[in-house]
Every structure is written in C-alpha cells, then in structure tokens.
Amino acid sequence: MRVVDLPEILAATDEDEIMAAIEDGFRRFSAGEAEVMAVGHLSFADPIGDCHSKGGWLRGDDIFAVKLATGFYRNDLLGLPTSNGFSAVASAKTGEILAILHDRGQLTDLRTALAGVIAARLIARPGAQVLGVVGAGIQAIMQAKRIAAALGIEEILVWARDPARAAAIGGEVVTLADLAARADLIVTTTPSTEALITADMVRPGLRIVGVGCDAPGKSEIAPAVMARARIIVDSRVQCINHGDTANAIAAGLIDGTGLIELGELIAAPIAFAEDDIVVADLTGVAIQDVQIAKAVWARLAA
C-alpha cells in the first residue's frame, strides 16, 4: 500500500480532467451505473464541526474509493485548515488497499467546488452578470473564483457574518438582502443551521446553488423558497433525507416528487423559463470522491 501526501497529490491534480470525470460520474450515477455507501456522519457542537464518510464504485471499474473528511469551521482562529481527511483507493478485483491519498481535505474541497461549477453552468440564466456568494470560508473562495470564470461573471457580491472575512473574497461586501436583490446567481457555502435565503428575498428568475447544507441539522435555503423552485439534486435519495430539500419535505411544503438529478440534467439539459426559480441542492455524493480519487491515482500510478 502506498501512502501519498498532499504535495504529490496536488502535483497529480488536473482540474479540467477532474471536472470532466465528475460530470461523467454524475451522469452514470443517475443512469444506475454506480454503487454508493450510505453516508456516515458525526456532528460536533463545540467547537462546531462535522465528519463525513462516503464511498462508492462505478460498475466495471477496477478500483473503488472510500473517503473520510472533516470540517471544523473555527480552525482558522487556531491557524489550522478548516478541512482535513483522506481517501482510500482499493482494488475492485481483490479488495487490496492500493493507496491512502492523504489529501488533508483538499480533494473534498475541490470536488465540491467543481460540482458547484457544473450545477451553475446548467441552471444559470444566459447572460448572468452578478454572482452572489454567501459565506467566507474555503468553499466561498473556491466557488466564487471558479463559477465567475466559468460563466464569465465580473461582478461578485459577498455576504458573511464576519465582514472582514467577506472582504477577503474579493467582491463587494453587501447585506444579505442586497445580495439577493442584485445577484443573478447565488451560491451558498455556510454551515448554517438556520435558513439564510428566505422567501421575501427571492424574485422570479433567481438561480441558487446550495452547497453548505450537506448534513442533517443544517439549513441555508428556507423551505418556502424550495416550495417555489424547480429543484435539482445531486442525489434524489440523499437529498430527501438531508439537505434543504429534506427540510422542505419535513415542513410539508414539497413531497419529493419532481426532483431532477444533476446527472439527469447533464444527460438532457433543460432550457428553464426566464422566470423560473431554480435551486441546485448539492449535498455531496460519493461518486464525486470516487472520480477525483481515480483521476489522481491514475496519474500517480502511471
């Protein structure tokens, strides 16, 4: 078994290649060509943090992957990264553990950011000019940079509870209400347990990529907003159980029918109506971890 540390992993990371692999992974997942483990989750209250375990396999592949990732959101106050973790790469023929990719959470951060880009490209209105970023952590930074580049957006609005951290993103720091009023596309990236985007903030045609609500107990987009939206989910089964979609179901405002999986949208893009409110609820699917681990391991093993 080979243990690979972060510098070697980063040297073997090609974002364009990984983006294509993740996109194909979503498509194959929705086509029934993947097996994924039930998500494991631990939640910590003081200091606030969580731990996820996810694993999966694309049928026919020679390898599969299992990932453990942690997020402790006050680590920056200690001078530590907020993310950590590793992925185990194993043979699908013998079960042998081939490698531990000790990526320290950076592969999870990257695959999450790239999923946001994939969703944004699929749901954004043509000619979108203003991106609103909710949050100021690592995902806010990564999503802002990549989504703006992918859509050709130059104007970025940022809101976070800490204005100084929001300013570090590089856009215009605004109130949450102003952000919602002006943005064509919003990406939410927080570990909030209370809805931040509320029904009074939402106007026809608004598009939202929800990234932070990836576990039970979290909430970024109010159930009343979800009830008005066309909802894209990365995993129908997963989002019915946790995420902003699950919160809306629990509130009795939607019943879980009509959800469109991201992989289905990749296979057959939809021309949404100009006034459609569209929410992409991304809770993080194991197939993303499989695809990024495969891409990196293929370069390392070559």
Image (cartoon, grey):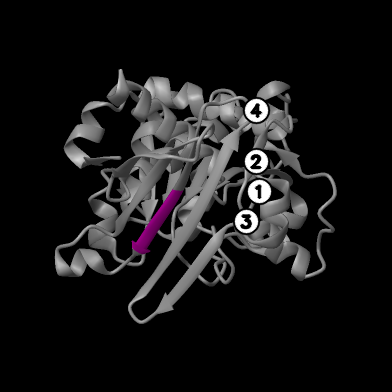
Question: What segment is highlighted magenta in the picture?
Answer: 67-71
Measured in 3D between alpha carbons, the distance from the residue under mark 3 to the one under mark 4, in whole angstroms, is 19 Å
Dot 1 falls on a residue whose secondary structure is loop
Q: Nearer the viewer, mark 3 or mark 1?
A: 3
Structural crowding at the residue carrying mark 1, measured as other residues with C-alpha within 10 Å and reported as few (<14), some (14–19) or many (≥20): some
> Which mark sits nearer the N-terminus, 1 or 2?
2
In this figure, which residue is indicated by the disc labeled 2? Answer: 35
Front position in the image: 275 or 98: 98
Per the image, label 2 sits on a secondary structure element best described as strand
- Determine the image quadrant of residue 227: bottom right
For mark 4, what is the residue?
27
Asked if the magenta segment contains residue 88, the reply would be no
**Residue 73 position in % (x across, y down):** 33, 66
Which residue, given by chain and number where applicable, does mark 3 sit on? 38
Residue at the disc numbered 1:
203
* Image quarter of residue 38: bottom right
